[in-house]
């Protein structure tokens, strides 16, 4: 195109060209609504069935335009990470940047291809909108700007955890998980959007958003402080917690949830044990109350209660029947998942609060519950579930039929257990995996080869054990069979154990959802083995209570009945942990807190009434 | 009045009078004002008054997360928002050491040139209106809207595209976008002659613009003039070529200059630049399809993002001249300081105040439009 | 070159940092800055003052001034950094060297309260109707000012009233998480 010279005088006639435009068709735009472009950032729509109420949209909103609103008719399910809150948008503040869409962990928000909202001054309330799938004007409008892989703002992938490879770990009981490098921990913590769903899902309501933030800032001591606000089993839970938080994590909706448990582990491992003790003890200076509490059982429930009560100034004595404190984490969880010294570190912090632990001191014949009642102002029964259940199938009384908890305890006590070359395990839960993998290690040591078969009732889609447990067990050479129900133990002519016969399972629960397995009797298999291990559940040894106390207490299908604070029918007796709640470490911790709070309250009331 | 407050000098001589030109005047760009002193219709002195569009962006940015500022920056210059986004993104990338994928760099150049075209069309329209040529004003605005249609399609927003994240751009191109962009360029090229005949070679305009608001190259340099206004005094300087960023060093384009340094020369430079931008976009359309790969480099979760401590002075060539961001991070989650150096902070204040002196009242608007001063960018 | 100049030059050399092909960073004492600018302008062709940036380092009790200079001939950008005491906050204008300084110095005076002696115009430009402290100072809290000066819009749409009747309603306002 030619250059116009600066000294060009211009033309008077050329502009008349514009007259020619009168002959052209006019360009018109109708006022009727039409959809904008495919990517347009119009008004919000929110798929309520997908939205989890995490409020991340509110957090990213640069204009403070989003208010979270509670909608009582929507489901509220902390365990699944669902809140009954939904975002409402103030269009007086929104700038339509769409960052809420790009960050939304569930992908439920989108913006429509709608251009206009107009109202009179009297209708200003119409600027505050609770978007649902129908959007601002209550009618479906095509969605424009929506979540895409390109616009995803949060890394969906976890930081990989360094772990011992199967061939190495099968050689012994060394801890498998090696922990995060400092930078890895920061990068993993950086994925957190601080929605707090984990906090709500956690039985003991750990302050995970706070400690994750502290880890991200590189402040491990602050993380430890935050962890200890709710959980004295910090190392234990950093390693073997059932991590309900991760099931609730909002990031898990589209990617891998944050490795909250590993972050906790990282924080605990980055602060020296002595420093942890200092940090925790710093802010606990309650004056002695003169009250005494006895706790029976030194597992997570008992020691958590002891920790709290000691910090309230009460004199706490814990009675432990076995040689060392710790309960199930000590005697039920294999060392490759939880090394002893980490449990010792947790317990040392608890003891540093002034808790006295008496080991090798069973309650029963010599020291009775009645004695405790007389000597203490309150007693907590937290003995856990230490006896394995039996399948009671024919042959289950044979000497080579064992229960998993008993074997696990014997391994942890240091007994040189000598498993035969072939073992069958009945059960599909985490305990079954624990014993299978422990025995596999012992077989490897003794025979140089592994032959372990796990027979679970459930199919793989409904498998009770953690997916990681199952995966790791298989990596280590354990054979896992799903949908196999035990029929009988086969005993040889010479009285030796020949193996286990199983039947194919067609269904586990009946129409009412009750446990009632059904079998296909045509599908019978024999699994040859010299040992059969039952890992189908545990019960409490309640014989320690004595007959008269047992009679005075209330029972619910074999389980001690307590109120929501853990109080039994006897005013001096509380109970906590697995024996009343079922097996789970973090529930036991939560229960310990609950019981301690209840006892503390009762003791205070007692003091006030007495003085 | 108390005697001690009496200031004789504050009163203009009796043959002079003061006039408030703006802030609400059709001949002023945006909300901006000039207080002018006149002798008859001849300007004796002028004083620029800003602040009508001050939103405190620099301060606001200190209170927001690094990513949240992407929604603020385009508002600093409404008619030419893309350079604001890109310059901010480049600054953060410089601080973090983020490599922007090539495809994203080409898409950014595409936006910058689209935005330049839209801005120049707007300025032609505005300038034409100050000389009474309203057809051109409507054309400029209407044709800019066709560019905005493509922005809407690409970025999801017509004016505030909010499309450039640190790390790249938020989306890849929609299907068939480059064909439609090519169609837009065809259309614009078909209009160039119309613009020439109705505006650039319109004797009404030429006579009004020639010799008005003249500055020499030396004055321009002393006054800190940049961009088309500087090039209209004969200095061939363009940040895109002389301090290149993105992929401008891989593109062919000419630097348009004029010698006269008046309102006409400035417009002729913009006229030429419109053509150069079309030329650049043609190259983008040709080469972009072959540039594969992602449109974004990964950035951390924006809610947990610390930018390494440091500072950067990043500058680019906007439609109005040299645009620069001075960004300081102390390693925190928010910027410690963001200073926006818009080209109009020179053009709309010192340069305008000087150029209108000696001109006639009716030329003030023309001079301001010929400088393409952008008040929101001055006020920030 | 005279001996007396040497320490100054040596120090200057130490504080020059080449930061890329066309970027140089210089850290310099405030009393030497005008001389440096004069040298850069007069001897090296740094004719264009691109900007003066001010940073409030409140914890150090200092303002940092950064002079961004471009040489059209060398194709190089020099950023000269200097620090001056926040209190009393007075510095010298460089208007006699660079006329664009007038705008930047006026702006910094208005936004940070830093006074430039010899600058042609220290009158307010943007904040003519503002009577508070210079707002870009770090100790001015914009959000607190806004909270005190303006009110959040209190909407009461029908849907909200219905939710409130059901026992729901506003759970968390945006102000609560910022």
Image (cartoon, coloured by chain):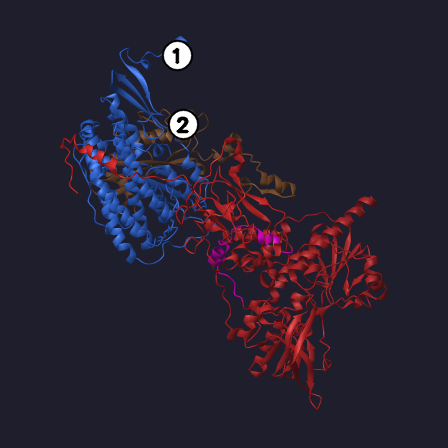
Chain colours: A red, B blue, C brown
| Left/right of residue B256 with respect to residue A356 in the rendered view | left
Q: Is residue B356 left or right of residue B301?
A: left
Residue A525 or A446: which is nearer the viewer? A525
Answer whether residue B116 is visible to the viewer in this image.
yes
C-alpha gap between disc 1 and disc 2:
23 Å
Q: Are marks 1 and 2 on the same chain?
A: no
Q: Quadrant of residue A271?
A: bottom right
Q: Residue furthest bottom?
A: A493
Residue A50 percent across, percent down from the top left: 54, 54
Q: Is residue C111 above or below residue B185?
A: above
Report the magenta residues as a range: A177-203
- Kindly state the secondary structure of the residue where label 1 is placed: helix
Using a 10 Å C-alpha cutoff, classify the residue at mark 1 as few (fewer than 14 neighbours), some (14 to 19) or many (20 or more): few
Q: Residue A243's spot in the image, x, y percent?
A: 59, 60
Quadrant of the snapshot with the N terminus of chain A? top left
Question: Closer to the camera: disc 1 or disc 2?
Answer: 2
The residue where tag 2 is placed is: C127
Between residue A360 and residue B36, name the one nearer to us. B36
- Host chain of mark 2: C
Q: Which residue is mark 1?
A: B5
Taking the magenta stretch, the answer to whether it contains residue A193 is: yes
Front residue (pair C147, B293): B293
Whether the magenta-drawn stretch holds residue A593 is answered as no
- Residue A571 % position (x, y): 82, 54
């Amino acid at each position: 195109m030619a250059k116009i010279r600066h000294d060009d005088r211009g033309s008077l006639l050329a502009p008349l060209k514009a007259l020619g435009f009168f002959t052209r068709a006019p360009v018109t735009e109708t006022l009727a609504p039409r959809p904008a472009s495919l990517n347009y950032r119009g008004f919000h729509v929110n798929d309520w069935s997908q939205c989890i109420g995490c409020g991340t949209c509110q957090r990213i909103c640069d204009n403070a335009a989003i208010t979270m609103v509670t909608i009582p008719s929507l489901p509220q399910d902390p365990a699944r990470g669902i809140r009954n809150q939904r975002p409402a948008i103030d269009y007086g503040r929104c700038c339509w940047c769409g960052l809420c869409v790009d960050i939304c962990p569930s992908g439920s928000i989108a913006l429509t291809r709608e251009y206009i909202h107009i109202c009179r001054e009297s209708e200003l309330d119409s600027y505050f909108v609770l978007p649902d799938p129908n959007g601002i004007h209550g009618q479906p409008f095509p969605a424009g700007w929506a979540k895409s892989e390109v616009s995803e703002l949060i890394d969906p992938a976890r930081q990989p955890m360094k772990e011992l490879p199967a061939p190495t770990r099968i050689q012994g009981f060394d801890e498998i998980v090696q922990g995060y490098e400092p930078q890895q921990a920061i990068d993993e913590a950086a994925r957190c959007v601080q929605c707090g769903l984990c906090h709500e899902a956690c039985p003991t309501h750990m302050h995970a958003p706070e400690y994750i933030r502290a880890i991200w800032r590189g402040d491990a001591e602050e993380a430890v402080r935050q962890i200890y606000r709710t959980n004295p089993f910090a190392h234990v839970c950093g390693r073997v917690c059932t991590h309900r938080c991760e099931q609730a994590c909002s990031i898990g909706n589209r990617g891998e949830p944050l490795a909250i448990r590993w972050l906790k582990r990282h924080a605990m491992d980055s602060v020296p044990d002595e420093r942890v003790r200092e940090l925790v003890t710093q802010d606990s200076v309650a004056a002695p109350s003169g009250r005494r509490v006895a706790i029976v059982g030194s597992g997570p429930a008992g020691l958590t209660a002891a920790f709290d009560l000691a910090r309230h100034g009460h004199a706490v004595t814990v009675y432990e029947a076995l040689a060392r404190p710790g309960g199930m984490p000590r005697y039920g969880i294999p060392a490759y998942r939880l090394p002893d010294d980490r449990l010792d570190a947790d317990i040392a912090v608890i003891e540093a609060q002034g808790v006295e632990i008496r080991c090798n001191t069973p309650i029963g014949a010599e020291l009775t519950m009645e004695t405790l009642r007389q000597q203490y102002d309150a007693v907590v029964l937290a003995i856990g579930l230490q006896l394995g259940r039996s399948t009671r199938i024919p042959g289950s009384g044979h000497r080579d039929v064992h229960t998993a908890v008993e074997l696990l305890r014997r391994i942890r006590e240091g007994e040189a257990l000598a498993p035969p070359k072939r073992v069958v395990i009945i059960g599909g839960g985490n305990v079954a995996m624990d014993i299978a993998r422990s025995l596999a290690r012992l077989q490897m040591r003794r025979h140089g080869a592994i032959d372990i078969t796990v027979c679970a009732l459930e199919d793989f889609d409904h498998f009770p054990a953690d997916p990681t447990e199952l995966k790791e067990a298989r990596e280590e050479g354990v054979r896992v069979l799903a949908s196999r129900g035990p029929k009988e133990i086969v005993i040889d002519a010479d009285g030796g154990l020949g193996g286990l016969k199983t039947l194919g399972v067609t269904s586990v629960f009946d129409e009412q959802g009750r446990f009632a397995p059904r079998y296909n009797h045509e599908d019978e298999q024999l699994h040859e083995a010299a040992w059969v291990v039952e890992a189908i559940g545990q019960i409490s040894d309640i014989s320690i209570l004595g007959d008269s106390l047992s009679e005075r207490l209330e029972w619910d299908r074999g389980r001690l009945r307590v109120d929501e604070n853990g109080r039994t029918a006897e005013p001096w007796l509380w109970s906590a942990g697995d024996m009343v709640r079922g097996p789970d470490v973090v529930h036991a911790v939560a229960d310990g807190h609950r019981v301690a709070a209840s006892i503390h309250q009762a003791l205070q009331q007692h003091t006030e009434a007495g003085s | 009045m108390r005697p001690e407050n009496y200031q004789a000098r504050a009163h203009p001589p009796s043959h002079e009078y003061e006039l408030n030109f703006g802030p609400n005047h059709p001949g002023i760009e945006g909300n901006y004002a000039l207080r002018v002193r006149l002798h008859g219709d001849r300007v004796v002195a002028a004083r620029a008054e800003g602040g009508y569009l001050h939103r405190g962006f620099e301060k606001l940015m200190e209170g927001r997360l690094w990513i949240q500022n992407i929604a603020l920056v385009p508002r600093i210059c409404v008619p030419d928002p893309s350079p604001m986004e890109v310059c901010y993104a480049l600054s953060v990338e410089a601080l973090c050491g983020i490599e922007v994928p090539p495809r994203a760099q080409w898409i950014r150049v595409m936006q910058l040139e689209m935005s330049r075209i839209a801005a120049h069309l707007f300025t032609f329209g505005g300038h034409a209106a100050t000389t009474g040529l309203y057809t051109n004003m409507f054309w400029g605005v209407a044709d800019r809207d066709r560019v905005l249609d493509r922005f809407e399609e690409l970025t999801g927003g017509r004016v505030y595209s909010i499309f450039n994240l640190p790390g790249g751009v938020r989306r890849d191109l929609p299907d068939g976008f480059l064909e439609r962009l090519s169609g837009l360029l065809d259309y614009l090229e078909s209009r160039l002659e119309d613009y020439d005949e109705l505006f650039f070679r319109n004797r009404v305009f030429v006579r009004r613009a020639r010799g008005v608001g003249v500055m020499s190259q030396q004055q321009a340099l002393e006054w800190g003039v940049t961009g088309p206004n500087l090039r209209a005094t004969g200095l061939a300087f363009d940040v895109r070529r002389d301090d290149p960023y993105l992929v401008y060093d891989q593109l062919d384009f000419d630097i348009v200059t004029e010698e006269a340094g008046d309102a006409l020369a400035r417009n002729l430079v913009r006229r030429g630049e419109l053509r150069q931008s079309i030329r650049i976009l043609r190259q983008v359309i040709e080469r972009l399809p072959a540039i594969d790969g992602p449109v974004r480099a990964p950035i951390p979760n924006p809610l947990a993002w610390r930018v390494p401590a440091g500072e950067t002075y990043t500058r680019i060539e906007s439609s109005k001249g040299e645009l620069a961001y001075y960004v300081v991070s102390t390693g925190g989650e928010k910027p410690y300081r963001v200073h926006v150096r818009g080209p109009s902070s020179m053009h709309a204040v010192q340069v305008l105040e000087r150029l209108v002196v000696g001109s006639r009242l009716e030329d003030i608007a023309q001079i301001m439009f010929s400088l393409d001063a952008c008040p929101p960018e001055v006020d920030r | 070159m005279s001996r007396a100049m040497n320490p100054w030059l040596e120090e200057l050399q130490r504080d020059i940092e080449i930061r890329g092909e066309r970027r140089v960073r210089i850290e310099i004492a405030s009393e030497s800055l005008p001389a440096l600018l004069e040298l850069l302008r007069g001897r090296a062709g740094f004719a264009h003052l691109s900007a003066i940036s001010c940073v409030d380092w409140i914890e150090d009790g200092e303002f940092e001034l950064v002079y961004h200079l471009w040489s059209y001939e060398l194709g190089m950008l020099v950023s000269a950094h200097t620090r001056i005491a926040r209190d009393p906050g007075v510095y010298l204008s460089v208007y006699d060297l660079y006329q664009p300084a007038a705008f930047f110095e006026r702006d910094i005076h208005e936004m940070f309260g830093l006074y430039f002696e010899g600058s042609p115009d220290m009158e307010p430009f943007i904040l003519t109707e503002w009577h508070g402290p210079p707002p870009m100072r770090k100790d001015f809290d914009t959000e607190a000012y806004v909270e005190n000066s303006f009110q959040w819009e209190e909407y009461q749409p029908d849907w909200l009233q219905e939710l409130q009747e059901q026992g729901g309603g506003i759970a968390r306002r945006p102000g609560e998480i910022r």
